[in-house]
Amino acid sequence: MRSQEFKGDDIHMSQRPLPQGGSSYRGDSGNASGPWWNPRYWRKRVWAAVIVVFLILVVVIPVAVTQTQNSAYPNYSEVSYTLRETYEGENFFDQFDYFTGYDPTGGFVHYVPREQAEQLNLTYASSESAVLRVDTSVGPQDEPNASTGRFSVRVTSKSTYDNGLFIFDVKHTPFGCGTWPALWLTDHSNWPDNGEIDVMEAVNQADDGNQMTLHTTSGCNMNVRRRQTGESEHSNCDHSSNANAGCGVQGPDESYGSAFNDLGGGIMALEWRDAGIRLWQFARSAIPTDITSRSPDPSTWGTAAADFPSTNCNIGDKFRNNSIILNINLCGELVYAVYGDSGCPSNCTDLVANNPEAFTDAYWELGRFDVYQAA
């Protein structure tokens, strides 16, 4: 029989003492190591793999989040609307208050009270339409003259709104050098905290179409997925950025001014709900039958002219307690910003003060305004 004597290097591996600190074994090197979960014992290629994975996570996760946000879109599900209020006929202006005094945005106008507006024929209404216009009677030789600003009108609805569907029948839009008219909604006493929605706005000859814009406090952006036919301009709605340009959408040339008026005007429809704010414009010859029958259904109207979804803007928080406002400003901040490139004569204040005939087209003619609320 063979001898049972063993030398030390012949002892079975299981009988060898384990290295202090663990029982791992690095098979490819023949040397024992620490536990796998302890980074102190990781080899270089393990560290390299960990760094690669970390970098992938740092890059991929934010990109995925951004792409998800950019592809998100609110649920504009069908809403049933009920007529709440109508502005129409000879009593059209009874539902508005007249703002009086100088323009808050630096315009070269005197906004006059109702009695003076009616005396100067600046506001009047019939069963078919209501008109709001700029004075064209005062010339440079008159006393008083327009050397400190021309007479105009700004009216604010007595009713306020937190949402709704608004149907505005607009037969004629004001235009002409030096003009800055607007149909808009805001809470004048709490601007910009309660937001501003510009439904129709243009300056000077207005031959580049209607601009639809939101103005808000910080935290409202439109750099998201949108469905609209208009052309987006700035995406940040914050009034403190881009010199209060807001987040605007430009309509086609025929959406405002002489081109719009020559076609008999049309309908501006504004839907304001928590999911978002959308605006449509319909030519006089293409008004949907559900609007004329006063049973509007925006889900059947197709792509909006302007779409301001709630994806990156809390609509319910940014917009509330708004009134409908109609005005025709002259000169002012927005006009001054573009007057030099407008092709208009002289300078804005000289034109306004000395040329009443320049404002014969500076008037709104309006049909019925209907305001609906979700049933």
Image: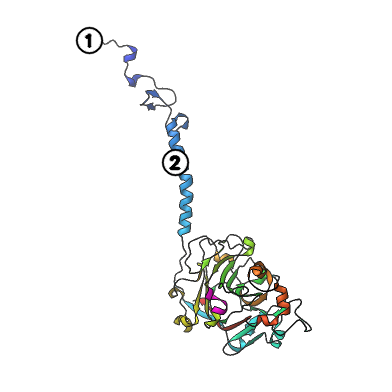
Type of amino acid under label 2: Val
| Residue appearing at x 57%, y 74% in the figure | 207
Q: Name the residue under label 2.
A: 53
Q: What stretch is highlighted in magenta?
A: 253-259
Circle on res. 2:
1
Residue at horizontal 50 percent and vertical 82 percent from the top? 284
Residue depicted at x 58% and y 67%? 214
- SS at circle 2: helix
Q: Where is residue 49 in the image (x, y as percent from the top left)?
A: 43, 37
| Image quarter in which the N terminus is found | top left
Disc 1 to disc 2, C-alpha distance: 57 Å
Q: Residue furthest bottom?
A: 127
Amino acid type, mark 1? Arg
Q: Where does the image place residue 264, in percent across and percent down from the top left?
A: 53, 83
Where's residue 189, x and y in %?
Answer: 67, 70
Camera-nearest residue between 106 and 43: 106
Q: Is residue 22 visible?
A: yes
* Sequence-earlier tag: 1 or 2: 1
**Circle 1 Cα neighbour tier, 10 Å, few/some/many (<14 / 14–19 / ≥20):** few
Is residue 334 among what the camera can see? no
Q: Where is residue 281 in the image (x, y as percent from the top left)?
A: 51, 76
Q: Quarter-wise, where is residue 349 in the image?
A: bottom right
Q: Which of 311 and 245 is in front in this view?
A: 245
Magenta stretch encompasses residue 258: yes
- Relative side of 155 to 61, left or right: right
Say which quarter of the image contains residue 212: bottom right
Q: What element carries label 1?
A: loop
| Label ID, residue 106 | none
Mark 2 closeness class: few <14, some 14–19, many ≥20 residues within 10 Å: few
